[in-house]
Amino acid sequence: MGFFRIRCDNAWAGALVRLWFARKNEIKGYSMSDVLSDAALAQLFLDARSHNAWLPKDVPDTLLTRLFDLLKMAPTSANCSPARFVFVKSPEAKARLKPHLSEGNAEKTMSAPCCVIIGQDLAFYEHLPKLFPHTDSKSWFVGNEQKIRDTAFRNATLQGGYLILAARALGLDCGPMSGFDPSGINAEFFSDTTVEANFLCNLGYGDASGIFERSPRFAFEDAARIL
């Protein structure tokens, strides 16, 4: 009888959970299994481009806050969330950034309303007692330098990808870049911290006249397989 009661209790619990999610989706008006519209997919992927020229239109601080509140929901290993973001907007901050940009990236970054430095905190594991309190996850990293670096780089890069998607979802255009001097940016913006630069991304409202022809992409069979 005990085993039967446990099975029944589990069945009821499962039914209640399914009912709760169904009711929640009904209230929200959508389900996570819904497919986005063609327009939404085009805005996020198919029509989105990396921009090199920018319209003189400000990106408000409130929009950058909203952007962060979206991208922070990205999945990361044990919720470690190692990415750190510096939104470079003011003329003074841009002047500090410019000497560390490659020649091809300097002018377009100075004309962009905002350039975000996506960094990775190598002491991310210090925050795991708060971010992942279910177990002693901090101990997984203490003293393991290679694991710390691999985890920080992998997950901060993932969060940077979510930043691009979140920005596009909010109507912003993006110009991600890797042409910069990491040591110079680290010294200028992350001195006396445990953060290192990962990549840069210009944000704003793109000027379509500065877009190149779209480069080719691989076909499925060239880059993927199903086993």
Image: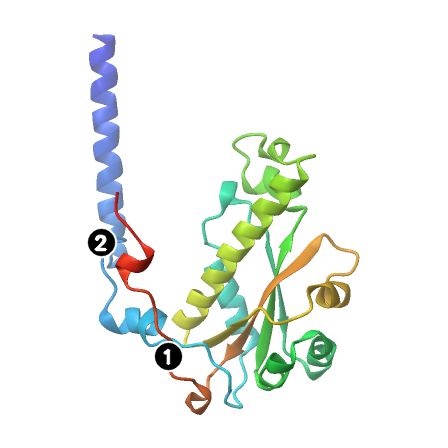
- Tell me where residue 164 appears, x and y as whole percent: 46, 67
| Occupied quadrant, residue 19 | top left
Which residue is located at x 52 percent, y 63 percent?
Answer: 68
* Label annotation for residue 193: none
Which residue is located at x 67 percent, y 48 percent?
Answer: 122
Give the residue pinned by disc 2: 26
Judging depth in this view, the residue of 79 and 107 nearest the camera is 107
> Is disc 1 surrounded by few (<14), some (14 to 19) or many (20+) residues within 10 Å?
few
**Is 219 drawn above or below residue 52 in the view shown?**
above
| Occupied quadrant, residue 108 | bottom right
- Tell me where residue 60 appears, x and y as whole percent: 54, 78
Judging depth in this view, the residue of 4 and 111 nearest the camera is 111
Q: Name the amino acid type tagged 1.
A: Arg
Give the residue pinned by disc 1: 214
Q: Quadrant of the C terminus?
A: top left
**Is 69 drawn above or below residue 91 in the view shown?**
above
Q: Is residue 125 visible?
A: no
Q: Earlier in the sequence, mark 1 or mark 2?
A: 2
Which residue is located at x 70 percent, y 34 percent?
Answer: 143
Q: Name the amino acid type tagged 2.
A: Glu
| Occupied quadrant, residue 165 | bottom left
